[in-house]
Image (cartoon, grey):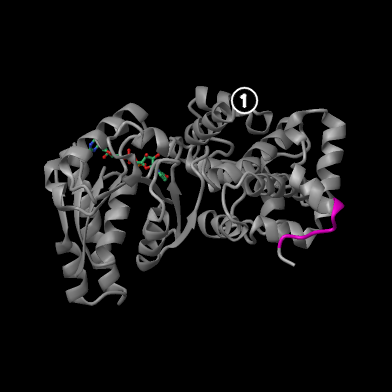
């Protein structure tokens, strides 16, 4: 057994998944939740998963048994006192998380690393109120945690030097693909991916194409695994709208991140997607949804517009030192299954072509939303590429 004892707080969809990953990596795990129902659901879920892995021959009987035994389900946070690493995955509320971290600081040993799985909150704010904020870091898993390879490791400006590298090594040992991201809104994936949704909604809003056509184009021509509208319906339009609105506020109302009225109306109307049976599409049995217009010219126009803005978004993140170019590309391929890293894709399409497309959108719209990143302009001027 691995000596490091891991605590996970919050036994919801993320916490239960993270506890499973840690247990499969050989750690003793304490999974804590204030709700006994959540703990019971997590325990039942784990039993089911370990038996399925056994049935499929992915684990021996002894391994499945040992994995299950390594997890202790507890309502008492004091049980986490021997943990060398605690990963918090509770409700997304800054004050509640700050209170929890202050409590953890009193319970855990001085050397324990305290991590948050937050998607949207600043790591520096979560750790900032502690006597020793240098041991606080973001470890951001993707849903479902046991299946998604990517983990964003996020040191804040108060995190001690070297901790990000230690956590990166640990995540590798857990079989994950870790990347290091700066403590800025949306970290890598939730920041860089905004135009995939935002620009697709803009195309819909202006009547250039309908949902079905945009989804078809981005899948068939763009090579994305899912179209933006089917993906938003799967994630939930309430969640997508909340993430977009938070990004917009966090970037001081930069028009690049502005949400759309369409999203707001869907949320107001309870059209949240698959979970309510209706969103951009109707999921009722026998419901008729529009067929895509499979015009190649229209499809290419859609893909070119969305992709050029995605590439610009990745270049902007690189320019502002959110992550290394390798980590930026890994994050999009491993975190949201993009067919290629966006910087490599920019090289492939020709940075000059990307810049021309964005500049022509800017000329048409005269909106800051369509401003090209200064680094893209500079690289085109100097004839440079990202990878060669
Ligand atoms: N769901 C996702 O796709 C996703 C992806 C990445 C990160 N996250 C982040 O992970 C965190 C958890 O998200 P989730 O989707 O698993 O939420 P969830 O609602 O499924 O689970 C949260 C759990 O935390 C428990 N809880 C709340 N306050 C607590 C406290 N003070 N002490 C102990 N337990 C407490 C709740 O009882 C619940 O079981 C959030 O910060 C979220 O932003 C979510």
Is 193 in front, or is 290? Answer: 193
* Residue 104 lies in the magenta stretch: no
Above or below 251: residue 7: below
Picture coordinates of residue 296 (x, y %)? Answer: 82, 54
Residue 78 visible in the shown view: yes
Picture coordinates of residue 165 (x, y %)? Answer: 42, 59
Is 333 in front, or is 137? Answer: 137
Local crowd size for mark 1, using a 10 Å CA cut-off: few (<14), some (14–19), many (≥20): few
The part of the chain drawn in magenta is 381-386
- Quadrant of the frame with the N terminus: bottom left
Is 257 in front, or is 298? Answer: 257
Tell me what residue is drawn at x 72 percent, y 51 percent.
Answer: 217
Tell me what residue is drawn at x 61 percent, y 40 percent.
Answer: 194
Tell me what residue is drawn at x 65 percent, y 28 percent.
Answer: 254
Within 8 Å of ligand 1, the CB of disc 1? no
Picture coordinates of residue 126 (x, y %)? Answer: 36, 35
Above or below 87: residue 260: above
| Left/right of residue 277 with respect to residue 44 in the rendered view | right
| Left/right of residue 77 with respect to residue 298 in the rendered view | left
Ligand 1, image quadrant it occupies: top left
- Quadrant of the frame with the C terminus: bottom right
Picture coordinates of residue 234 (x, y %)? Answer: 50, 44
Q: Quadrant of residue 199?
A: top right
Pointer 1: what residue?
253
Which secondary structure class fits the magenta region best? loop
SS at circle 1: loop
Residue 296 visible in the shown view: no
* Residue 383 lies in the magenta stretch: yes
């Amino acid at each position: 057994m691995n000596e490091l004892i891991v605590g996970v707080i919050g036994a919801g969809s993320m916490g239960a998944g993270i506890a499973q990953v840690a247990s499969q990596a050989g750690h003793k795990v304490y999974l804590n939740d204030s709700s006994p129902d959540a703990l019971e659901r997590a325990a039942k879920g784990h039993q089911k998963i370990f038996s399925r892995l056994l049935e499929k021959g992915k684990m021996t009987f002894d391994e499945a048994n040992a994995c299950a035994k390594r997890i202790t389900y507890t309502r008492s946070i004091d049980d986490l006192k021997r943990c060398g690493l605690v990963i918090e995955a509770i409700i997304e509320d800054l004050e509640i998380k700050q209170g929890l971290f202050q409590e953890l600081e009193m319970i855990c040993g001085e050397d324990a690393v305290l991590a948050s799985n937050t998607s949207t909150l600043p790591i520096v704010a979560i750790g900032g109120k502690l006597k020793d904020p240098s041991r606080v870091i973001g470890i951001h898993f993707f849903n479902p945690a046991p299946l998604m390879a990517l983990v964003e490791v996020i040191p804040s400006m108060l995190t001690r030097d070297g901790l990000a590298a230690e956590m990166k090594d640990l995540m590798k040992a857990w079989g994950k693909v870790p990347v290091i991201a700066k403590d800025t809104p949306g970290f890598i994936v939730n920041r860089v991916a905004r135009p995939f949704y935002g620009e697709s909604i803009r195309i819909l809003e202006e009547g250039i194409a309908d949902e079905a056509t945009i989804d078809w184009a981005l899948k068939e021509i763009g090579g994305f695994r899912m179209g933006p509208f089917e993906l938003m319906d799967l994630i939930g339009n309430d969640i997508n709208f909340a993430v977009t609105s938070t990004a917009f506020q966090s970037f001081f109302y930069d028009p690049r991140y502005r949400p759309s009225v369409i999203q707001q109306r869907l949320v107001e109307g309870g059209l949240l997607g698959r979970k309510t049976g209706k969103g951009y599409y109707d999921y009722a049995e026998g419901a008729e949804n529009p067929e895509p217009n499979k015009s190649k010219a229209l499809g290419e126009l859609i893909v070119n517009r969305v992709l050029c803005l995605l590439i610009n978004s990745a270049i902007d993140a690189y320019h502002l030192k959110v992550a290394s170019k390798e980590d930026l590309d890994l994050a999009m391929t491993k975190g949201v299954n993009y067919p290629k890293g966006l910087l490599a894709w920019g090289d492939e399409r020709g940075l000059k072509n990307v810049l021309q497309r964005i500049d022509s959108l800017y000329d048409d719209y005269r909106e800051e939303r369509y401003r090209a990143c200064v680094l893209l302009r500079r690289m085109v001027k100097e004839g440079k590429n990202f990878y060669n």
